[in-house]
Amino acid sequence: MPFIPHTEEDVAAMLELIGVKTTDELFQEIPANLRIAGPDGIPAGLTEAEVSQLAQQRAAGDGDVVSFIGAGAYEHYIPAAVWDLATRGEFYSAYTPYQAEASQGTLQLIYEYQSMMTSLTGLDVSNASLYDGASAYAEACLMAVRANRKSGSRRILTTGAMHPVYRAVANTILSNQGIELVDLPVAGGVTDLGALAAMDGEDFAAVSVQQPGFLGTLEAVDDITDRAHAAGRLVIAVCNPLLLAALKPPGSWGESGADIACGEGQPLGIPLSSGGPYFGYMTCSKSLVRQMPGRIVGRTVDVEDRPGFTLTLQAREQHIRRSKATSNICTNQGLMVTAATIYMSLLGSEGLRRIAARCHANTRQLVTLLSGIDGVSLLYDSYFHEAVICLDRPVAPVLEALSRRGILGGYDLSEHYPELGNALLVCATEARSAQEIAAYGACMQEVLAKTQVA
Amino acid sequence: MPFIPHTEEDVAAMLELIGVKTTDELFQEIPANLRIAGPDGIPAGLTEAEVSQLAQQRAAGDGDVVSFIGAGAYEHYIPAAVWDLATRGEFYSAYTPYQAEASQGTLQLIYEYQSMMTSLTGLDVSNASLYDGASAYAEACLMAVRANRKSGSRRILTTGAMHPVYRAVANTILSNQGIELVDLPVAGGVTDLGALAAMDGEDFAAVSVQQPGFLGTLEAVDDITDRAHAAGRLVIAVCNPLLLAALKPPGSWGESGADIACGEGQPLGIPLSSGGPYFGYMTCSKSLVRQMPGRIVGRTVDVEDRPGFTLTLQAREQHIRRSKATSNICTNQGLMVTAATIYMSLLGSEGLRRIAARCHANTRQLVTLLSGIDGVSLLYDSYFHEAVICLDRPVAPVLEALSRRGILGGYDLSEHYPELGNALLVCATEARSAQEIAAYGACMQEVLAKTQVA
Amino acid sequence: MKEPLIFEYSRPGRRAPSHAPGAMASLDDLPAEVLRADPPVLPEVSELQVVRHFTRLSQQNFSIDTHFYPLGSCTMKYNPRVCNRVAMMPAFANRHPYGPEEHGQGFLHCMFELQEMLKAVTGMAEVSLTPMAGAQGEFAGVAMIRAYHLANGDTQRRQIIVPDAAHGTNPATATMCGCEVVEIPTRADGDVDLEALRSVLGPQTAGIMLTNPSTVGVFERNIETIAALVHEAGGLLYYDGANLNAILGRALPGDMGFDVIHINLHKTFSTPHGGGGPGSGVVGVSQRLQPYAPVPVVGRKNDQYVWLTEKERPQTIGRLSAFMGNAGILLRAWVYMRMLGAEGMLRVSEYATLNANYLMARLMQAGFQAAYPERRASHEFIISLKDIVRQTGVNTMDFAKALLDRGFHAPTTYFPTLVPECLLIEPTETETRQELDAFVDAMIEIRDLALSDPQEVKRAPLSTPVRRLDDVRAARQLDLAWSENR
Amino acid sequence: MKEPLIFEYSRPGRRAPSHAPGAMASLDDLPAEVLRADPPVLPEVSELQVVRHFTRLSQQNFSIDTHFYPLGSCTMKYNPRVCNRVAMMPAFANRHPYGPEEHGQGFLHCMFELQEMLKAVTGMAEVSLTPMAGAQGEFAGVAMIRAYHLANGDTQRRQIIVPDAAHGTNPATATMCGCEVVEIPTRADGDVDLEALRSVLGPQTAGIMLTNPSTVGVFERNIETIAALVHEAGGLLYYDGANLNAILGRALPGDMGFDVIHINLHKTFSTPHGGGGPGSGVVGVSQRLQPYAPVPVVGRKNDQYVWLTEKERPQTIGRLSAFMGNAGILLRAWVYMRMLGAEGMLRVSEYATLNANYLMARLMQAGFQAAYPERRASHEFIISLKDIVRQTGVNTMDFAKALLDRGFHAPTTYFPTLVPECLLIEPTETETRQELDAFVDAMIEIRDLALSDPQEVKRAPLSTPVRRLDDVRAARQLDLAWSENR
Ligand SMILES: Cc1ncc(COP(=O)(O)O)c(C=O)c1O
Ligand SMILES: Cc1ncc(COP(=O)(O)O)c(C=O)c1O
């Protein structure tokens, strides 16, 4: 019996002690008409060897590709130590650290994580993670509406270069509470500052800004922040935390800094893994801490006055506050935070910055190469590690042709940004070698030569 | 500086304390003419990402093959837990457990390993491992010569179906001490018992028997053992430990059992890995314990009378006895023993037996299939999980053709057993699926049809 | 020995360049005002320091891999290592979420199979894998209920009924969905109070959220009546699947009348808890809620596996995650389910229930008070220590800490709140009878010590890396991040 | 908490069938007399029990990953995790040793490169990777020396000269090779006594085995004279490469006049010690010994990597392993060397030496007695506690145990035997100055305690899972295996 340790003798003795004849009797309280003999259509059990082989076959079928897709999830090299340590049983198989004395490992690690995230974002307080970047963004919007009591508005202004799926997820979550996201138009790949100025008179609980934006470009975050604060709005920063080793941290935006930062933690040592598990991070200024969703770890002392760590401010949370909690989140993305904390420790500030800078350089190299090809042009000159290129024909068939050659050429923008034409978002992280970048160039040339301009 | 934690400030302070100006001064005692500026021809350092990618490329170039080779190293499924646990840093990065109180984990594990090996082999005492099966066999021969004081002979009789490389390795090691291995002839894939009987009058320190033999067949171990003992020879058993879950253990051979058992531990959860690291096991009867080479762990008590584990009988070893030690072995194959102990714990006696039985069944299936093909015949009817088949043409080109089709068809016997003709040793462990076995059959058919009978 | 903070190992100028590109590429082409002036303060430590620090930290945790962990409601069963191995296979781990379907057929095939297996064990018409934990599954569920009512023009249905024993996420979720929470009491026998239920049902009722077996550890015997009542009133039923382990393969929420359900794969299907997460809160829906299910869902078209999105599901409540949810966790659950097969699933509930009933019986024999002594335990049960507390002054938290000293993680304490001084105990099917017996011995030992020397119990824990922590100070003198200037 | 034996968790009838084929295939076609009557007694435990047991056991170890481990002569430096990752990549881990060369070009390429890099750092003409540990490398080396003499008709050359400070494997190896061991003393300054050497050289001399830097932690300054003397006498020089870390990239054994050398890859090249092994004792040889090198060796023919075996090397001493030695360990060393590059190798010796000299200087400042105070330390050095022992009765072993209580693994004790009450201390280059300082603090604390309360030091260790063990009983009342009937 896989995973079940009982011997026949055990079962007999246990049933006798309980005072029943069979294990079936233990289920008597389930109304007879609801009981079934077993689930239908479940394939027979496999041994570990069989399931491993099956998985291997399936995975092998997916083929070996070189990816130039970013769009919110980024391929970075992950040092071997990261997951060797994170998957140690003591981290991997522990629960949320409710019993603090039996969970100092996890608790101290989260405290260290919080310290790293506050430093990266330049804000005061971090929680212990949310599900992912998109849901963290939704939580940040909810939090801003709760926090901005002065405004009382249930509307949030959003830069148009915010990740379209983040906007969609926030909408799924916010709409139920009647909170509205209002999109600002994009001009030149970034927020149309004129359109923003035109909103000055209107009441919004917050302005949310993604930096770099979904289109890879850099927003004028100082201006946007100062203008928002002047209008009584909070500022929500959505940032790739890895790039914050090189980019101005939200806490330093404008005169007084953004109020809440959040985003996708995946670039910090988490494998792409078809989209998850990743983790959403969130930090904020001290004054907002009681509006923060999710777990928070604090440092305190034990009865012998030794330092120790514990979950704190639990009165914000669902298991205490129930229907009045700041969020319904319970299980978060702890293991991913474990990995990210190890990753950041291994890389340090210098290492992260080198990676960010290399991503930028690689993307520049790629874009230079691609835009030298007939029928390809660069849309926005300034970008960090993703850039929009435009083709002289529809993107989808080109991507398909590239994919048949083992190259995933980027993210097709036509669904979410049809106004940009045949636009393609490309990304070359530090994980892409010079040869791979050159190969993309060569393949693109070949594909464009072979396919027709529509 | 990869792996080196010193800051410039550290270095300055350390040099000052030592009282030198540069680290170069620390090497002044090396005669100047011996000092070099650095090694020549070492490629520049790589980052972890670069070396990983390079390794991946190299490994990928080796291709994906399905192997039917055994011949002393066997592909078995290794449960994920085995290496997850064995590579925990506390096992992986510890030294030989000299400081017993700081090494109870390793020591207890070795004691458990010793217990499992004595039970598998039916003997009293196990050491903590030797390098591999071949070198363990050589050590067993040395041990037998030391132990058999009555005989005083420096010759050892060996069954002809002993792994040819084991014989070669033993020869490399024994010849330096003037110890001679005498091979018995093979008849019908096993020891020629008549030839053995003919030796009755001669003096040998020991007889060594591999069971199953290199040719996959099963020796008459009871007879051989009893005859050896009658002639005043010790018996050295060389056995695949996994198969001992199904085969009669050396300790039960004949009237009084073999005296020493040894062999290759690889089948117990160790990856094939191009030939190593594996581990050699060795067990013996109680009376021979002081002749045993290698580390041995014993159970004792601490000052509070609690049970604990420690290295024992160290007076046999090189670090105490120096030139009079039972062997020069120091570093052994500890990590492999760690994995094997976990493997045996996961499988249990029933699990090992199931694997052994399935290996037998799979090989039978393969042999039935192959010997149904024109030009292929089975040489010996009785075998355990390897069998010799004969082709109607030279083996090498057939193996090459199979290999081009992704199938490693077996071990070519023509080098070591030219007298068998176009003989090929095949093996299908439990890791081979029915489809893979069928694929081998189909490929063999195709290859034989396409190539010529020489 | 106390492990310092990783920052305390840090020294300026220490570099770990084997993990980063060898040289710093230029960023000079970017405007200075978007760049960072001062580098963030991250530890500057060597790889060995990192390995040593986090190895030591890990050793300060209790976990399933080191301790019996009978934390009620959390299903702390063995997490097979092979599940992790498969999910971390390079081909799976390196797949980009926006990789084309043709380069993801293997992965999608697994996901499709997972959906099918989950349908089979829940009796629901469709499963969406996207919610990333139970609470997000609840959100999806209540949002679907609302969407359904709104689609029917039922704009006034905003009340969600929740038993007082419910997990905190249930009421919190209802609020997050813009609903109003109506709490109903649990009867002394552990079942829902039907009278109370009837009294709150009405045209304002959006639905009810139930956990079955409930958080008090018993199967709700009147589930069919409840379903009928709620449906009659025009409401829908939400099944909180946190306790599915107890009835896996033996009863289907779909048969009980539930319209929507979430399953915590990190409970019943043994994906790791990871010190807090990640989980997966996949949702299953009945036919009538199918149009509203969150996207993406994996479908099958002409022998190809494809993503079904807003295009195919225009009425969907939408997306809950940037991509498809916790894919790697879903893969782990797929491995586990494929290994179990139908038979293995039945065994899960069989032995989880056997262990719980055995442990309850043994504790009752030893004089402990079960909260529902007349009922069969499901896969968990409640012991109330209220008499011992009254007698000795030793409280449930003291008991919990004393268990730590004896090598057992504590059961869930003080939840559900309706039972005073309660321990919610869930042994799971992967523990041996010997382990359960040892736990009973420890409980007896602590009780006896409480009777003879209550102060000694109150000193616990003594063997953990720290002793009892000052939670009040933690909340009053907030210290939530290390900083250099301290 | 004491962890029971895995056998104590066992219960008859417990099965773990997820790891074995589902059904028992028949063996009925085999003769009954070769089959096993009673199954072996192996634990019958669940996967969770296995994971929990071995996780807990692991936590009872000191290791590099958890503790400073300054075990002299053992080079307990950080073992990079990536080396393991690469060696365990399925394509490498699953390759059969008899797989054809055309399916092993990637692997063979790595091995060929490793040979080349090892030649570069030793100055030898050829490297054979097959020896599986230092001691086997020594065996190969001495066997080659003998083969060389025999090939020259020098049958009488059977003496191997070994300094008294030598590691035990040196004399043991000489014996194993059928040679006679002649020991020569070490001078008070740590160098070999040249007069003594001269007096034992002669036509019976096969060679000398030297470790340089030596096991007393200093570089042998007269190495060139020694080489000249031995060569003049017709003998050859064997280099025990256990201490190569100290001079890596800075001096070549080949330049010093050595004819044959082994390197412990598990020391200098950071492959794991694994609680005892495996190691790798690759050998390097000068031109004149090249014909005798053990096979197989990786060669290159027409742009293909090939095995060179007895066919190409008819004079080889032969094979030492069933296949090619510890291939997976060799791969780990390859990864490490490729990461370091030439510069990184120089840094290894630079910082290993810096750390050793710093630690020696600090301990001397603190009043500890260095065995060779006038010498530079190599990558290790010796402290003699003989004065403290005389003064307090606390001995070196007591010191070692007291270090364990303070979170440090003990240095090597009582080796080399020529220095009384000695600690051989090797910090390695991967430790920080802070860690070294903490070690000095602990040493001072123990010394002070020895002076004020020697009995307290003698009680150590107090914090380990067991306290001091009865070694005499272990050897007298042999208990080497668990059995059911006990
Ligand atoms: C009964 C019950 N419902 C809901 C939840 C919430 O699930 P999650 O933590 O996955 O969000 C839990 C988990 O603790 C639970 O026990
Ligand atoms: C100086 C010296 N020589 C030889 C050896 C033997 O090497 P191995 O343990 O790899 O056999 C050692 C290892 O301890 C050593 O320190």
Image: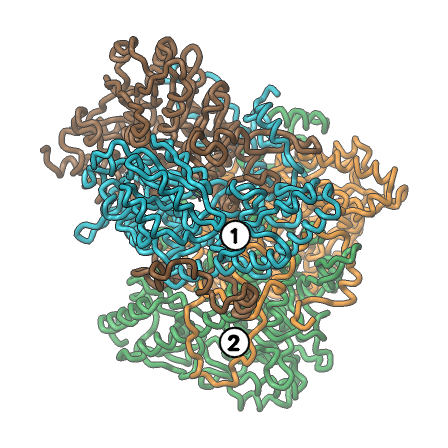
Chain colours: A brown, B green, C cyan, D orange
Q: Is residue C214 above or below residue C315?
A: below
Q: Which mark is residue A115?
A: none
Image position, residue B298 (x, y; %): 71, 63
In terms of depth relative to the viewer, which is nearer, C434 or C98?
C434
Of the residues shown, which amino acid type is indicated by label 1?
Tyr
Residue placed at 17% from the left, 27% from the top? Answer: A418
Q: Are marks 1 and 2 on the same chain?
A: no
Q: How many marks?
A: 2
Apparent side of residue C81 relative to residue B446 in the rendered image (left or right): right
Of the residues shown, which amino acid type is indicated by label 2?
Met
Q: Quadrant of ligand 1?
A: top left
Whether the residues at callouts 1 and 2 have beta carbons within 8 Å, the answer is no
Apparent side of residue B5 relative to residue A46 in the rendered image (left or right): right
Q: Which mark is residue B162?
A: 2
In terms of depth relative to the viewer, which is nearer, A46 or B439?
A46
Residue placed at 50% from the left, 34% from the top? Answer: A320
Image position, residue D337 (x, y; %): 51, 43
Q: Please identify the residue farthest to the right as the structure is shown.
A: D391
Could you say whether the residue bearing mark 2 is in a helix, strand or loop?
loop
Could you say whether the residue bearing mark 1 is in a helix, strand or loop?
loop
Badge 2 residue CB within 8 Å of ligand 2: no
Image position, residue B95 (x, y; %): 64, 51
- Residue D101 in sight: no
Q: Is residue A430 above or below residue B273?
A: above
- Residue D339 in sight: yes
- Chain bearing mark 2: B
- Is label 1 or label 2 in front? 1
Q: Residues within 10 Å of mark 1 (few under 14, many from 20)?
A: some
* Quarter of the image with the C terminus of chain D in it: bottom right
Residue placed at 69% from the left, 30% from the top? Answer: A305
- Chain bearing mark 1: C
Q: Which mark is residue C372?
A: 1
